[in-house]
Image (cartoon, rainbow, N blue to C red):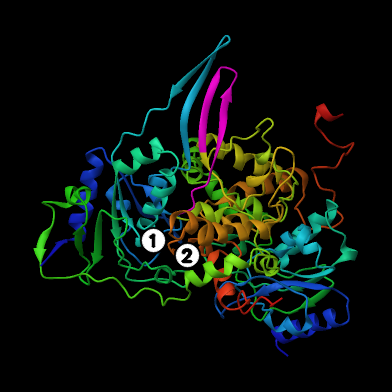
Amino acid sequence: MSTQERLHETCRRLLEEGTVQVVIGYAHTAPGEPAFPVFISDPADVGQLVWNRCCLANLTKYLLRQEIRALGKPAIFVKGCDERALVVLQRESQIDPAQMLSIGVACRGEESPRHAACAACDVRRPRFCDIMIDEVPDDPPPVAASSAAARYADLEIFLTKTPAERVAYWTEELSRCVKCYACRQACPLCYCQRCIADKNRPTSIDTSATLKGNFAWHITRAFHLAGRCVGCDQCTRACPAGIDLRLLNLSLARAAELQFAYRAGIDRQADPPIGTCSERDQESFIQ
Amino acid sequence: MSEIISAAELRQLVGAWLVQGRRVIGPARIKPERVLFVPLRDAGQLLLDDCQRPANSAKEAVFPRHEKLYEFRFQGKQVEILDAPPPAAPQVVIGARPCDAAALPILDRVFNWDCRDAHYNRRRDLTTLVTLACRQHDRHCFCTSLGSGPGDPCGSDAMLYGLDDGNYEVRTLTEKGSALFTGHTHASDKVGLAGPGPQPVLDPHAVGAFLKTHFEDPRWARWSARCLGCGACACTCPTCHCFDMVDEGGAAGGAKVRNWDACQHALFTLHASGHNPRGTQWQRQRQRVYHKFHIYPQKFSAILCTGCGNCTRNCPVQLGLLPVLNAIQGGGRIAPGEAVR
């Protein structure tokens, strides 16, 4: 039985038995075209579900959406990176694992050159899912990114630039930002009820898409995701201006790993560096 | 007879415009997979290959994402208001697509409707639009469904038609267009042709008729369930023109600025009371379709869409207008992936 057939059979069973009320998965209009999120409630519709290398979206974003929650208990498709988001969402008390079912799909990485994150990914097989489909990848991952050096290689190359060159790079990149907030809306961990960028009494971050407003927004967002970003790279993928936000996120992920030996969404038991109080904290201001 | 310009001469001409102090905006490849309209630094940046539609639109030349309207200064109890200087630099948009150019007459109606917008009109007067006819299209293009097409001269000051030898036939349409090219082209018997464009896939009048009676249709929630609520569609749309006005500055003074806004953002219609008349994402999606195919047509007798496809091309979840319009036309199916309800 093919992966797709197993996937259909599993979802049909889950819906027919009433284990879940909706399957959050992927569908496409034609083979080879990017798959899009789909919400299947009727067992007769499970044939629409697909799993292939064009399933780019991180569906965990929908778990917190009021309209999707209203559809009932969900089963959700997760790749390895998506599963990391589930772990963080659970740690941050945003989801209750008892009220959902995760269906893991082993990912071979996306082929598009836009997804540098996939080349440095070391979680291609979800580890904690309730159900695993597609247990063994047909082909081994092209790059085994098991070391921190491999994970942060792109950042290390960037950091060989002088500070002036780095400022010039970000000035050029962020000058293209039009403040569409696709980065925020696509991010599974940007779930604030009211984002600081939307606060206007008083305004914290200029709403203007000027260099000042754009630096303020992207730096604030990166810091807010420090030690939380799971590296799914949805922000970079969603950006219509082609800004490589991954570099910003990698910088803070590296800080969390080097300073706190912590990687978001990897270890379900590990205490996140932000939001955890420890007597062993070295900073004097906190003692 | 036709007038042609070689690719090398065209690039030289663009370089000359820059030297003359004109602002020149054109497509440039800013990332391996991303082509955007950007203010060109040099003519070498210009990408006059029509195989890829820029991911943004040329509207920014006349309707910038951020614009200072006036400044204010506090001096004791006095407030001094200073008009922002009007835009002054002449500019050329080169390599706009017909779907970008056709958007400008549409924007003109809005910015000259109940008041004449001084900054918009000044920029419009200063702008010359040189459009590159499309020889190719992708699966998101649907200009031919909306009465436009790959060689549509609507809104352009001059048209460039690619020739098989890599050069261009130039057809000037206005005095502004002629002023740019006169003396720079050669007489020829070669004639450039636009590509066939996409097969028409929908009837905008049928969509308009549907909208008249289906505001409360329960399927809107299904059709737009996957919308993430970002503004990538509106920000890259050639015709979307909604803006927000805010005061920015400090205790000494500041400025009233106009910034792009997007109807897909939750804050767009949020009232000070806390009430939001479009409280859910599907209501915001429905609004975007209504504005383009019902509200604007009622007011201005034209459709607020040129079929460029950027809304779907840039959508992180492959939504945008076309899948919804197809769903309306197809009797309820959004795509072979979304169940009929």
Could you tell me if residue B220 is visible in this image? yes
Q: Which residue is mark 2?
A: B309
Quarter location, residue A50 = bottom right
Residue B294 shown left or right of residue B197 in the figure:
right
- Rounded to the nearest angstrom, the CA distance separating label 1 from label 2 is 9 Å
Q: Nearer the viewer, residue A52 or B272?
A: B272
The magenta segment is B239-258
Magenta segment's dominant SS is: strand
What's under tag 2, amino acid-wise?
Gly
Q: Which quadrant, please, contains the N terminus of chain A?
A: bottom right
Q: Looking at the image, do the residues carrying marks 1 and 2 touch, with CB atoms under 8 Å apart?
A: yes
Residue B99: mark? 1
Which badge, 1 or 2, is on the more N-terminal residue? Answer: 1
Residue A236 shown left or right of residue B162 in the figure:
right
What's under tag 1, amino acid-wise?
Cys
Q: Which quadrant, please, contains the C terminus of chain A?
A: top right
